[in-house]
Amino acid sequence: MIVTIAGKELKTLFASPLAWVVLTMMQLIVGYAFLRRLDDFLQLQPQLAQMGSAPGVTELVAGPVFGTAAAVLLFAVPVLAMRLIAEERRNQTMVLLMSAPVSMTEIVLGKFLGLAAFLAGIVALTAVMPLSLAGVARLDYGMLAGLAAGLVLLAAAFAAVSLFVSCLTVHPVVAAIGAFATLLGMVLAGEAAGDGLRARGWTVAASLTQVFSPIKSFEPFGKGLFDSYAAACLVLLTAFCLALAIRQLDAQRLRG
Amino acid sequence: MHSTSTDCAVPVTTMPEQEAASTISARGLTRSFGGHIAVNDITLELRRGEVLGFLGPNGAGKTTTMHMLTGNLAPSRGEISICGIDLLEEPAAAKARIGYLPEVPPLYRELTVDEYLQLAAKLHRVPRARRGEAVGTAKQRCGLADAGRKLIGTLSKGYQQRVGIAQAIVHSPDVVVLDEPTIGLDPNQIRDIRALIRELGSAHSVILSTHILPEVEAVCDRVQIMHHGELVYSDTIAALKRFESGATVLVGLRRPPPPAELAALPGVAAADAVEPTLYRLQFAAGKDPTDALVKTAAARDWGLYQLKPAQTSLEDVFVHLTRREENQC
C-alpha cells in the first residue's frame, strides 16, 4: 500500500510541469558548478602535480558539485513537498486516501517515499557528472559513493521536514515558504547553537543540536568521511519529522 | 456485478447474520467543533438493498455525518459499525466495505480515467487479478466505457462526476455513500445517475445526500431529515406520502369561484390559491372527490383546464419540519 501511494505520487509529480522544471533547474545549476570546478581544477593541475599528497579530482570537483546540489535542494524540496499534503487538501483529493482502507502511517510513508525516490533520481543525475570523468581521470569511487549516500540522506531529511510543514496548512504556497524558512532556520540557527554550546564546553548538548542542523551533518561526507554520527543525525531528523506528520494528520481527523 | 455477502472486499471476522441485517449502523453519533455541536446524537441504520435519502438544509450537519460514517472524521461520541465491523476499532477492514463520493469529487486531474480508477481499486485492496475487471465494470456502469484514456482534467463536469461515482463503486463496496451526486449534471445525465443509484441499491446499501426532493421520492426507500445537527424525521417513503393526511391536487380553473366555494365542496378539506387561476385543493383524509370535482366544474362552467396531483408531499414535510424547528429556536 505504501508503494501504491509512492507510485501515485511519482506519477502525478511527473504529470505536472513542476518535476521537469525542477530537474531542468537542477541540471543547469549543478552542470554549471561542475564545469566551473573542472576548469579550476585544470588550471591548478600543474601546481597540484608538484605537491606530495595533493587532493584528487574527486575531492576538488565532486565534493563542491554535491555541495551545490545540496544548496539547490534546500530550495527545491519545499516546493516539491507542498504538493504532498497541503495541495491534496486544498484540492479536496485527500478524501480518496482517507476513505480508503489505508492507515495514516501508510499515507505519510508512501508520500515520503515517492518524493524520496524522485530526489534519489536527482542525486543520481548529480553523480553522473563527476562519473563522466571516469575515462580520463582516476576517481575515488568510495568517496563518490559516500557523497551520494550523504546527499540522499540530506535530501530525505529535507523532504521529511517539508512534509511535516505541508501537513500544517491547506495553502500550498504557505507550506512551501514555511518549509523553506524552517530548513533555512535549521541551517543557520543549528550552526550557531552548536558553536555557542561548544564554546561553553557543553559538548553533549552541542552534539545533540546537530540532529536539527542537517547541512552540518552533510559536511563530513563532502570531506570524504563517513561519519556514522552525522548519518544517524540525518536519519533521526527524518524519522522524527515523519512521526510528527503522522501525529498531525491523526490529530486533524480527530479535531476536524 | 452481482454482489452477495460473500464477495465483500476483505475476508475478515464477519458475522453473516448481522451482515445481512444491517450494512451500516451508527448509534449516538455526536460531533462538536470547539463548543459548537455540529451533529448531535444521530442514530442511523441501513439494511442491505436499501437506499436512504439524507436530507436537510445547508449547514444541517449532513456532510459532517457522512465524513464520520466514512472514517474521514472521528466522532466525538458514538459508535459506527459497517457490516458488523467497528469503524473506529478496525478502520481498515471497515473502510474496505465503504465507497464514498464526497461533495467535491476527489479527482487527480493529471491522471487518465483508467489510471485513476486503477489507483482507487489498488487503494481499496482489490486483488491484482480482479482489478482490470473491476475497473471495466465500474466504467461500464457509469457510462465511461470510451473515456478510459482521457485525462480527468479535460473531462466535462458531468463526466468528472461519473468518474467520482465510479471511484466509489470500483471495489464493489457494501455501502455506497454519495454526497450530492447529481449536482452540475444535465437532465439526461441525472436520469442515468438515478437509474444507476437504483441499480446500486439492489445489491448494495446506498446513502444519498441531496437537496433535490423529487430525486429522493424517485430513488429512495427511506428518508431521514436532519436539521441543526439533529435527526428530525426518519421514515419510509411510503409512510411519508401519508404523512400529511389526505392527498393534494392542483386545479386550474379559467373562471374560478371564490376559494370558499371550492373549500366547501364535499371531501375537500382546504383550498388555497397558488396563482389567480390555479388552486391547491387538499382532500379530506381517506376521501377522493376528484370525480365529483370534475362534474361540478363542468356543471358550473368554471372552465377546468388542469387537474394534477401535487407531488409535494416530501417538500411539505421538509418545509414543515425545518421551518417549525426554526420557529422554536
Image (spheres, rainbow, N blue to C red):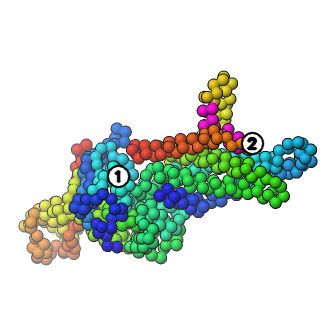
Left or right, B105 with respect to A123, comes to left
Q: CA distance from mark 1 to mark 2?
A: 50 Å
From the viewer's side, name the closer residue of B79 and A56: A56
Residue to which mark 2 is pinned: A223
Figure quadrant of the N terminus of chain B: bottom left
Left or right, B299 with respect to A230, comes to left
Give the answer, above or below, for where A24 lies relative to A49: below
Check residue A221 for magenta coloring: yes
Helix, strand or loop under label 2: loop
* Numbered label attached to residue B209: none
From the viewer's side, name the closer residue of B256 and B161: B161
Residue appearing at x 49%, y 70% in the figure: B114
Residue A48's quadrant in the figure?
Answer: top right
Figure quadrant of the C terminus of chain B: top left
Helix, strand or loop under label 1: loop
Residue B126's quadrant in the figure?
Answer: bottom left
Residue range of the region highlighted in magenta in the rendering: A207-222
The single residue placed furthest to the top in the displayed view is: A200
Residue B146 image point, x, y percent: 47, 76
Check residue A179 for magenta coloring: no
For badge 1, the amino acid type reads Glu
Residue B30 image point, x, y percent: 30, 45
Residue B166's quadrant in the figure?
Answer: bottom left
Left or right, B12 with respect to A171, comes to left
The 10 Å Cα crowd at callout 2, few under 14, some 14 to 19, many 20 or more, is: some
For badge 2, the amino acid type reads Lys
Residue appearing at x 28%, y 46% in the figure: B78
* Numbered label attached to residue B90: 1
Residue A105 image point, x, y percent: 47, 49
Residue appearing at x 27%, y 52% in the figure: B26
